[in-house]
Image: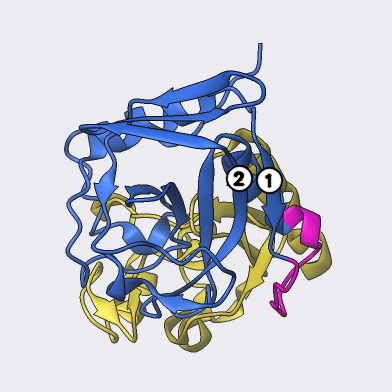
Chain colours: A blue, B yellow
Amino acid sequence: MVLLYFFFFDDNFNVQENSNSIDLDLFFLDDNKIIHLATAGMSLHNLNLEINPFTYSLNMREVLSYRRIFAYDINNSIERNNLTSLSDYTAFFELMAKRGFYSYDKVNIDDKEDYTFQLITKPKFDCKIIIDSSVELGNLDSSRSIEYNLDFLKSKTVFPEDYSEFDLRNFI
Amino acid sequence: MIEKLNKKIRRKAEKLKRDKNFPAYVSGAEYNYLQKVEQSGKIKEAEFVKSLKNKLEVFGKIGTKYNGSSVGYCAETVSANKVLKKFPSKLKSLNVGIAIRPRTLQEGKKCKICKSVF
């Protein structure tokens, strides 16, 4: 059995106050897709986000339990000057894409108040059904699908689906 | 010695990556024989070594923002505090190691507070 020791926050944990010391996983929903975003210690106090520490922990547990059924594409134009290896860098974002998420990362990890993000990996899926906040993604050719029961944050507008950099504050 | 510390920091970051446990950074500090490797986060008030806290509070109260960073939450600070618990007067003699983001194993730059304090 593999044990995963990812963060479980108690109800008193203030996510905003501690945002500089955690590389949070945030999950958004837009009209076309489900989104995973890694914060790399980005300051959250300037953003209009309500993150419940309890549902945050449940989200992570739920996501890691999903089957990995999707083929995916990787951004092949990543420019960072602080990588040990490209595969180390993309590994976690690949895990997210295999589970159906468009997965984005913070571009400049050294500036906590820089909100520039970039798509790192994206899944290939054929159909998506959203009923209220329940989402299902599937592959038409294999009849396999995943139903997502997460506490998604709602995006203000559709997140970019190409690999260009963007300012997160325009989308949430 | 610092090479050995940096190696320990990398090993700890790799373990956190495997466990999918993602603090913003992992770093380390050393004095003499003692090396400590810790992740970014809050230090309990009762645990804070006074000499370090005083130096940090030049930039603002613990937990407030200075130049975008939370004062006192860096992995370097948490590690240094552990070393200073044993050697409270050795703040000026501490070495601090690299800072690694466990999710991607990227190496981060030191923030302005850490550059000044260590």
Secondary structure mostly taken by the magenta-highlighted segment of the chain: loop
Residue sitting at the far front? A141
Q: Is residue A140 visible?
A: yes
Residue A80 among magenta residues: yes
Asked whether B61 or A115 is in front, the reply is A115
* Residue A20 point in image, percent of width and height: 37, 64
Chain identity of mark 2: A
Q: Quadrant of the N terminus of chain B?
A: bottom right
What kind of residue is marked 1? Tyr
* Residue B64 point in image, percent of width and height: 22, 73
In the rendered structure, which segment of residues is drawn in magenta? A76-88
Asked whether A65 or B59 is in front, the reply is A65
Determine which residue is flagged by label 1. A72
Determine which residue is flagged by label 2. A123
Discs 2, 1 touching: Cβ within 8 Å:
yes
Sequence-first tag of 2 and 1 = 1
